Amino acid sequence: MSGQIQQLNDRSRQIFQDLVETYLATGDPVGSRTLSRARSVGLSPASIRNIMADLEDIGLLYSPHTSAGRLPTEAGLRLFVDGMLEIGDLGDTERQAIEARCTAAGRDLDEVLNEATHLLSGLSQCAGLVMAPRIEAALKHIEFIYLSPGKALVVVVHQDNTVENRVIDVPAGMTPSTLTQASNYLSSRVAGRTIREARDDIQKELAERRAQLDELTAHVVEAGIAIKSGGSGDEATFIVRGHANLLSNIRALEDLERLRQLFEDLEKKRDLSQLLDLVGDAEGVRIFIGSENQLFGLSGSSLIISPYMNSQQKVVGVLGVVGPTRINYARIIPMVDYTARVVGKILE
């Protein structure tokens, strides 16, 4: 990549940078007349066209069939992002908003991740996404809280102090005292273990009726086991917000087709567990442009993601933004990076 930059003289570099910045701002092919007015380069439109033709020859620009203007290729965008992009910094107001909204979600992991996706979607005007593997941390405590007739809240506290909440159905006539009995019974058997580790022992004990529990209490205990084992609970958490943002700047039928492909990939959650593979063990933001993006490459999208870590500095999930290749990289990169740091801090 550095070699390609060295191929450009000062004028070619300036024309290329102006063209990409104009494209990112407008989404339209950029012509020589537009560039001749962009900065005081002292070149005529004809001279600029010659430079653009040279940039096209080395694979940094291309000319779509519908326009005489040029657009950056994926290689051109990569060169710009890696070698020319001036990444901004978040203002104090944005930093405070991210911290306040994520912190307000408390220590419940699902709520924190939901808030993070809403934030990224709203601030970037793209689609925000978060992925977290299923938690298998040892448990500290399980509590059932009466909500209303037929409904109870299950509060699961892990040894690392992360919290998960679920609403479950309970039999009619369930009393708060029965829920307390179920809480005490289950907590005494799962403390320091995962539900998977404790499940078989608890089910065997219930079957043999060695535990002196009535039918209602046993029913609640079994519901508590089920909520943390088997079924959809075994899958990674994947949250996407802000699909509608991607619809706001469609300019052509081919854009609509690419967007349809992206929506299909997001809805099917196709191979999204690979998000963790994309970031590896590295800290910081990773950027994937167009076909570099193995998850959404068919839609011609860009993916900006960052891992977030727990108190042991182990990567436990990924968050980021997906959108068209002309997204505002300079603004979104620090936004994703800071949000990942805030989420990691909350998990600590």
Image: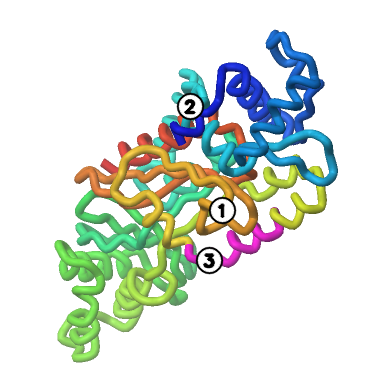
Residue type at tag 2: Gln
CB atoms of marks 3 and 2 within 8 Å: no
Residue located 73% across and 46% down the image? 247
- Label 3: state its secondary structure: loop
Give the vertical position of 47 relative to 125 (above or below): above
Q: In the image shown, does 129 or 233 lie closer to the viewer?
A: 129
Q: Which residue, given by chain and number where applicable, does mark 3 sit on?
A: 270
Q: Please report the bounds of the magenta region as a residue range.
A: 259-271
Few, some or many C-alpha atoms within 10 Å of disc 1 (few <14, some 14-19, many ≥20)?
some
User: How many numbered marks does the figure carry?
Assistant: 3
Foreground mark, 2 or 1, reads 2
Q: Which residue, given by chain and number where applicable, does mark 2 sit on?
A: 6
Specify the quadrant of the image occupied by residue 285: top left
Residue 286 screen position, x and y as percent = 43, 42
Asked if the magenta segment contains residue 268, the reply would be yes
Residue type at tag 3: Arg
Q: Residue 291 bears which disc, if any?
A: 1
Few, some or many C-alpha atoms within 10 Å of disc 3 (few <14, some 14-19, many ≥20)?
few
- Label 1: state its secondary structure: helix
Query: Which numbered disc flags the more N-terminal residue, 2 or 1?
Result: 2
Specify the quadrant of the image occupied by residue 203: bottom left
- Label 2: state its secondary structure: helix
CB atoms of marks 3 and 1 within 8 Å: no
- Left or right: residue 150 compared with residue 264: left
Q: In the image shown, does 32 or 310 lie closer to the viewer?
A: 32
Residue 4 screen position, x and y as percent = 50, 33
Is residue 101 visible in the rendered structure shown here?
A: no
Residue located 16% across and 63% down the image? 191
Residue located 70% across and 31% down the image? 23
Few, some or many C-alpha atoms within 10 Å of disc 2 (few <14, some 14-19, many ≥20)?
few
